[in-house]
Structures are given as structure tokens and as C-alpha cells.
Image (tube, rainbow, N blue to C red):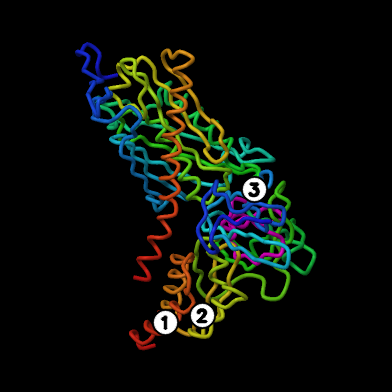
Amino acid sequence: MGGTGAEKPTLIRWEERDGEKVAIRIDGRLPEQLRPIRIEVGVLGNADGSALVEYGATRVLAAVYGPREAVPRHVALPDRAIIRCRYHMAPFSTEERKTPAPTRREVELSKVIREALESVVLTEMYPRTSIDVYMEVLQSDGGTRTAAITAASLALADAGIAMRDLVAGVAVGKVDGVLVLDINEVEDNYAEADMPVAMAPSLDKVLLLQLNGVLTHDEFIKAFDLARRGILEIYKLQKEALRKKYVEAETSTTG
Amino acid sequence: MAKIHVSPRSIVVPGDLIAEGDDVEAESLFIEKRGKKFYATITGLVSVEQTDDKYKINIIPLEGAYIPRPGDIVIGLVEDIGLTHWEIDISSPYKGILTVQEALDKPFNPVTDSLKRYLDVGDYVVAKVIAFDRARDPLLTIKGKGLGRITEGSIVEIKPSRVPRLIGKKGSMVNMLIKETGCEILVGQNGRILIKCPNKDIEEVLILSIKKIEAEAHTTGLTERVREFIRKERERRGV
């Protein structure tokens, strides 16, 4: 996206720490370090459920409506709910204005996120209805699809929709030969590989796995392990954020 | 031997392990059993009840839509009129169907008579769910004591998931509200509440207390706090 024509920045700096050579990334992180994550649940009044998720400068808002009567009615299924997803990037989310019309990429991401969510939501509990999930990327700095899926699963839980587990996602990349967790936009632009992963941690199931670029077999195993550790960390923050909504309400009334 | 992983009345979120063991029994639809382990599938409050040789676990959902069950009393809004039935909004993903047979005591001839004469669009009704098998829309009836068109009072809407809290254990909360305000209260399972109050001022206090219960449904000692709230408000307003 951005960097075409521009000179490639130094993405990995090697530093001596405690007698060991450590890779330091362009934003000062260690390879296995996540960006600062902020999660807030129940941020929209009109939606049945909502969540705002930030991975560093990446910011995604998710809203859920439903279960509600499916319109048009012929799309409804007799034995379960349908899930409809819209992943969308706001025109102001990128450095250069993005046209608001859905691109091929957005249509694809909406589909893969929908499929990931379909495998955790207990759709058979709500036959003949639809559950609509809207994800809006407000600011993009790499890893928007994984932030979107994290936000979407929280919004579903906030709406009181039954699901087997929450979903958390994170992207792993290979930058200058080093595997790095939660890659940002600059790293992504020059990366040799980029692998978004989403999992249901308590089910221990992978719900989304894409790979752009090339990884060797060993690298893939390492990268996946890295993603998994990142996801478990995010999963903890997700649960905390969901509980916090109610704890806060409690302290504000009793205090 | 059962192992309980949560403290009673704590908040669980989807994917949380609640308990494991053979002597555990799940009472809620929102608990999923995988092998010997019981997981929560919804955000809610857990309760653990211990009987002689069993642990009964339950979740009271904190959010979620109203799913009709036969026997529920609901307050509906007439949305559309068909030839021999009314379509009724019961603030649920499924719309209620009220047929003539379940509304009138006499035979009805659609050629000479119109359903509009009995219930029009925009009317509120107190109805009972008689059947709902999920494959078709829930069937309602307004034949019975206390059922039928609403002619007076006000309707307050809250989230359906807060209804159990508004009623309280064995009706403790709603009985307290009736005693403290002197209003008549009818709670529909779908989150609509019909109130009939002696005057406007007391009605306002009651609405505020209902909204307070909705907002603080997950907290403990709520009944006493609301009682306090009503007394203070009445004093302040001089009613």
C-alpha cells in the first residue's frame, strides 16, 4: 500500500543485551511482543452488542444486531440462524482515502470472518433469525482482520448470543528473516511473509489461518506457536474487558 | 467428585470452565457439556446449588433476546392485521400470531366482519404464549383472566434479560415495588411492563426505579437499595 517507490526502512536492529544479540523492531518491540492492546465492550447504545478493539494504532469497532427476524425472509434457514458479516474500512482509516465501496479484499475478509464466527456461535439456538455483525476499521495499521474478529466475538458476547468460546486473532510475520508477532503496517509492507491466525482458545481450535508469502516448514511451526501465545494473551484481555463492563457498573452505583 | 471452578454469583463469559465431574448437573441451556467438563456459552451470573449428592449449576443471562416459551405472559403490540389473524410484536426475533379463535368468543365471518373492529394496529395486548416449537411463529391467546386489550396505564420497556431480576426471588422485588408505590404492576416476560398508578408523580418514581433495576440487575442487595431510592424520591417530590 504505502511504501511503493520509497526507500526501505531498517525494520530490524540487532542489539547486544545481557551478552545476547536481540532483534529490536522498528517500533522498539521485541519479536515476540504484542502492541499495547485496549479493549472496551458496550460502546454503542443502539446496537445489541458492541466492542472497540485497539492493537497499537489499529482501531476497529464492531457492532452486533440480533438475533432478529431475517430480512428478506427467504434468506432465513429453518433450523438455525444465519450470520451476516460486514468488514469495512472507513474512508479515513488509511493514509490515502479509501473509496467507501466494498473492495474485493473486504468481501473476502467478510467471508472468512463469517466462517470463523459460524463455528463458535450456537446458531441452532436461534432458528429462522439473522445475526448481523458489522466491523468498521476506524484506523488501519496492520492486523485489521484479526483485530476485527477479536472485536466481533466480543460484540457477540455482549449481545448475549450463545457461543462456545470467544475468538481472538493475531498476525505473525517474517521480517528480514525474523519471525515477529502482531506485525504493523510498515513491517507488513516489506515482510517476506504475513500470517493472520484466529483461534478459539478454550476449544483449542483454529478458526482462521491465512498466509501471504513464504515460510519454511520449521518457520511455520514456530510462527504458529508464536501466534498461539499472542492469542492466549489477547484472550485474557478479552475476558477481563467483558467482566469489567459489569464490575464498573457495580462500583459506580455502590460507591 | 465434582470440581467447581467458579465462585457463586460471579460473572462468567463464553468459554469459561464452570465445573467438571460426573455429579454435576447443568440446569441452563447456556451451559455446554464437553466430556466431563461444563462450559459457559453466554455472559451471565452463575449459581451453584448443592444437594445431597449433586451439584446443580445454572446461568442467569445478563444480555440476550426474548425467546418465547409456552405459558409466558407477554405484552404485545398489534403490528398488522390479516384476514383471520393479527401479527403481534412481542419484542422478540419471532413475531406473535393471534388467531380469531384465540381472541373472540363468537364465530367470526371475514366476509361480513372486520378484525379491525376488535383490535387495531397500535393496540397493546396482554397475551399468553400457548405454543412455540421454533419451526413456526409463536401462537398467542388473549382468552383468559387478566388477558386482552390494554385500555389504561403506561408501558415501560426494559431488556428481556433483566425480567427475572425485576420479579426477584419468588416475586420479592415486584411485590416490594407494589407495596412501596401503591401501583398495579404487570410484568411481561418479554420485557414490557404495564403499570397503573394513582397519579403521574408516583408513576415517574416507579419508572425511574424500574430503570434503576434494569441498569443494576447484576448487583447484590438491589431490593433494599431500590426501596431506599423510592422512599427518598417520594420524600423529595412530596408524594
Say whether disc 3 or disc 2 marks the residue closer to the N-terminus.
3
Q: Chain of mark 1?
A: B
Say what amino acid the circle numbered 1 marks: Glu
Give yes or no for contact between labels 3 and 2 (Cβ–Cβ under 8 Å). no
Give left or right: position of B92 versus A220.
Answer: right
- Magenta part of the chain: B66-94
**Please, what secondary structure does the residue beneath circle 2 have?**
helix
Which disc number belongs to residue B177?
Answer: 2
**Please, what secondary structure does the residue beneath circle 3 have?**
strand
Residue B184 screen position, x and y as percent: 55, 80
Residue identified by numbered label 1: B228
Residue at 37% over, 69% down = A253
Say how many tags the image has. 3
Q: Residues within 10 Å of mark 2 (few under 14, many from 20)?
A: many
Say whether disc 1 or disc 3 marks the residue closer to the N-terminus.
3
Q: Residues within 10 Å of mark 1 (few under 14, many from 20)?
A: few
Q: Nearer the viewer, residue A130 or B215?
A: B215
Give left or right: position of B107 versus A147.
Answer: right
Say what amino acid the circle numbered 3 marks: Lys
Residue identified by numbered label 3: B37
Residue A161 screen position, x and y as percent: 55, 48
